[in-house]
Image (cartoon, rainbow, N blue to C red):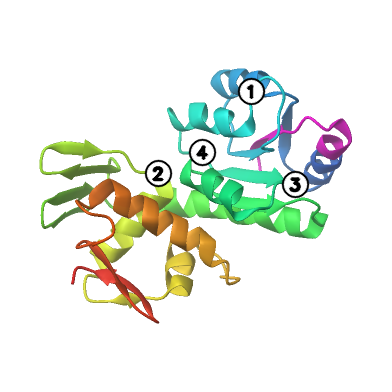
Amino acid sequence: MNKKILIVEDDFSVSELMSNYLKNEGYYLSNAFEGEEAVQKFKSEKFDLIILDIMMPKLSGLEVMKQIRLDSSIPILIVSAKTDDVEKALGLELGADDYLAKPFSMIEFSARVKAALKRANYSKDENNGTVFHYMDLTVDSKNFSVRKQEEKIQLTAKEFEILKLFLSHPNNVFTKSQIYQNVWHDDYFGDENVINVHIRRLREKIEEVPSKPKYITTIWGIGYKLGE
């Protein structure tokens, strides 16, 4: 398997539980117990996945994620006892790949880890270098760049994949379930918040008036499609 995972968790017993479980499944593990240590380890070592708690000493998990996202699109799985939608949405807006609320079963935890690593590998293998032009957008899937006229737009990995999905199928209407299955490459369990947050954030970045979208429009009661 040879996948290396960084676990960022300040509760030693929880960190040990996750580490031992994943070691038994063949992963290489590294641990950080506060935010600054996590950033230092990320900068000095190469990881395939980061498991990140939100409530961390010295530097919060959200601040850790902000710093990581300046340099990397590595998959990040948030694990936290903070389960309200606002905190969850904030984590997703910053580029988290998935969210797992404490307490959780180790079976579910293992499944989420495998899914995150699988999605990361799929995305790497999927790139075919296609350049899309739509209205005043230019989307290059080879270097993951998006330009609106001459302005460069910074998207998270998932925002980019959602936009590319619509551009690749300009006549299709996608339900939230279909978007999740195509972008996350996993079964959809009805968590609409994940899709809602990503669509809203994508619109805020590419639309002139996000409340009146012209690039990705809503088909009420069904889903979304490209254009009007």
Mark-to-mark CA distance, 4 and 3: 23 Å
Helix, strand or loop at mark 2: loop
Which image quarter holds the C terminus?
bottom left
- The answer, for residue 42, to whether it is visible in the render is yes
Q: Are marks 3 and 2 in contact (CB under 8 Å)?
A: no
- Residue 15 or 213: which is nearer the viewer? 213
Judge the density around disc 4: few (<14), some (14-19), many (≥20) Cα neighbours within 10 Å: many
For disc 2, the marked residue is: 156
Residue lying farthest to the bottom in this orientation: 221
Reply above or below: 80 against 36: below
Is residue 76 rendered magenta in the image? no
Q: Nearer the viewer, mark 4 or mark 2?
A: 2
Q: Nearer the viewer, mark 4 or mark 3?
A: 3
Helix, strand or loop at mark 4: loop
For disc 1, the marked residue is: 59
Which amino acid type corresponds to the residue marked 3 in the rendered image?
Ala
Reply above or below: 79 against 118: above
Which span is picked out in magenta?
A: 1-16
85 with respect to 82 (left or right) = left
For disc 4, the marked residue is: 74
Q: Which disc number belongs to residue 81?
A: 3
Where is residue 44? Give x, y as percent: 58, 18
Lower position in the chain sequence, tag 4 or tag 3: 4
Mark-to-mark CA distance, 3 and 2: 24 Å
Judge the density around disc 3: few (<14), some (14-19), many (≥20) Cα neighbours within 10 Å: few
Where is residue 227? Give x, y as percent: 19, 68
